[in-house]
């Protein structure tokens, strides 16, 4: 059962407004990138050899957790995690968790002990 995300109406409103405010060039770039994300196969993605942290929202239905995990596993040194109780806008819905995960990862420390994320997978 999917939990309700309280900030979803606010995020949808802000996202819709940002789309409406885009000029034609930005709308075309946005559409092109969206098509690329939804259509292209991951096997066309270049290999990444530096350590990488891939995270997404637990309920992301745009770039699904399984898609993000598949992408992470294409990298040599990856860490993958789900930000709990969030969707595609996890960085807006759970900014403290996102910042703490990013900061801890960039400092080379273990992110497992941070609260607010789950399904941690690592190949580092």
Image (cartoon, rainbow, N blue to C red):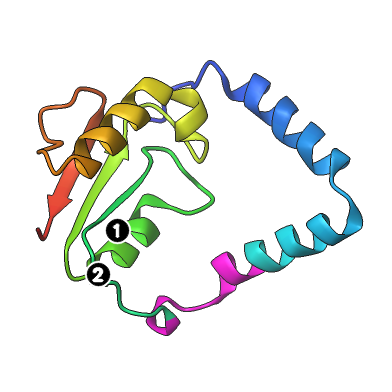
Categorize mark 1 by other alpha carbons within 10 Å: few (<14), some (14-19), many (20+): some
User: Quick check: 74 left or right of 38?
Assistant: left
Residue farthest toward the bottom in the current orientation of the protein: 44
Dominant secondary structure of the magenta stretch? helix
Task: Give the x, y percent position of residue 23.
Answer: 89, 51
Give the quadrant of the N terminus.
Answer: top left
Q: Earlier in the sequence, mark 1 or mark 2?
A: 1
Depth order, front residue of 15/50: 50
Task: Give the x, y percent position of residue 21.
Answer: 86, 39
Q: Which residue is mark 2?
A: 75
Q: Is residue 43 magenta?
A: yes
Instruction: Identify the residue shown where x is 36% and y is 38%.
Output: 58
Instruction: Identify the residue shown where x is 81% and y is 56%.
Output: 27
Task: Give the x, y percent position of residue 30.
Answer: 72, 58
Give the quadrant of the C terminus.
Answer: bottom left
The answer to which quarter of the image holds residue 51 is bottom left
Q: Which residue is mark 1?
A: 69
Q: Is residue 67 magenta?
A: no
Question: From what the image shows, is residue 61 above or below residue 69?
Answer: above
What SS does tag 2 mark? loop
Instruction: Identify the residue shown where x is 10% and y is 38%.
Output: 110
- Which region is colored magenta? 35-44
What SS does tag 1 mark? helix
User: Quick check: 6 left or right of 95?
Assistant: right
């Amino acid at each position: 059962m999917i939990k309700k995300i309280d900030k979803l109406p606010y995020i949808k409103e802000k996202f819709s407004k940002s789309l409406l405010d885009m000029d034609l060039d930005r709308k075309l770039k946005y559409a092109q990138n969206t098509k690329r994300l939804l259509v292209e196969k991951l096997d066309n993605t270049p290999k990444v050899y530096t350590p990488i942290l891939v995270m997404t929202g637990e309920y992301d239905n745009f770039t699904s957790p399984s898609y993000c995990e598949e992408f992470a596993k294409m990298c040599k040194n990856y860490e993958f995690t789900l930000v709990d109780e969030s969707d595609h806008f996890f960085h807006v819905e759970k900014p403290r968790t996102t910042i703490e995960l990013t900061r801890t990862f960039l400092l080379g420390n273990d992110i497992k002990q941070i609260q607010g994320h789950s399904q941690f997978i690592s190949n580092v």
